[in-house]
Image: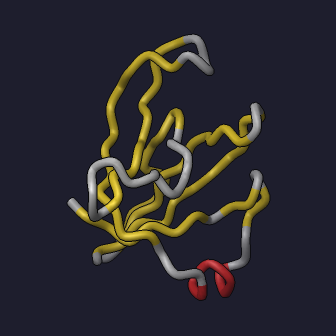
Amino acid sequence: MYFTITRMRDKGVARDWKAIKQTPGIRADINIRNEMCELLNRTSDIARLRPQGMPLDAVPIPPLLDARVSGMATNAFTLSGLEEIDGCLYAQSWWCRDV
């Protein structure tokens, strides 16, 4: 299922809602699977985006490790977890809403 996804943090630091709402979202299919994570050296629920378009297009944002639904409302939900940037793990949340 396709959603509009907006990242809610920059390197672990929460962005304010005004900035989040003004950021254009990424339209993509969210795929969540439990799989072995080399970075964490254990299994993890990993959320990945599959962008709309060609199958070999670059993925616009890193996967979300230890992904879980942290909030849900009528027209949107929030996935939270960890993302790896330049070898460091940071807290990240994705605001996901219907296209």
The percent position of residue 25, horizontal first and vertical second, equals 47, 75
- Of 25 and 57, which appears nearest the observer? 57
Q: Is residue 13 above or below residue 97?
A: above
The percent position of residue 17, horizontal first and vertical second, equals 65, 80
> What residue is drawn where x is 52% and y is 69%?
6
Quarter of the picture containing the C terminus is: bottom left
Give the number of marks.
Answer: 0
> What residue is drawn where x is 35% and y is 59%?
51
Q: Quadrant of residue 13?
A: bottom right
Quarter of the picture containing the N terminus is: bottom left
- Of 12 and 63, which appears nearest the observer? 63
Asked whether the viewer can see residue 54, the reply is: yes
Can you name the residue that lies furthest to the top here? 41
The percent position of residue 72, horizontal first and vertical second, equals 39, 63
Asked whether the viewer can see residue 74, the reply is: no
- Of 13 and 63, which appears nearest the observer? 63
Is residue 36 rendered to the left or right of residue 1?
right
The percent position of residue 54, horizontal first and vertical second, equals 27, 57
> What residue is drawn where x is 73% and y is 71%?
15
> What residue is drawn where x is 29% and y is 57%?
29
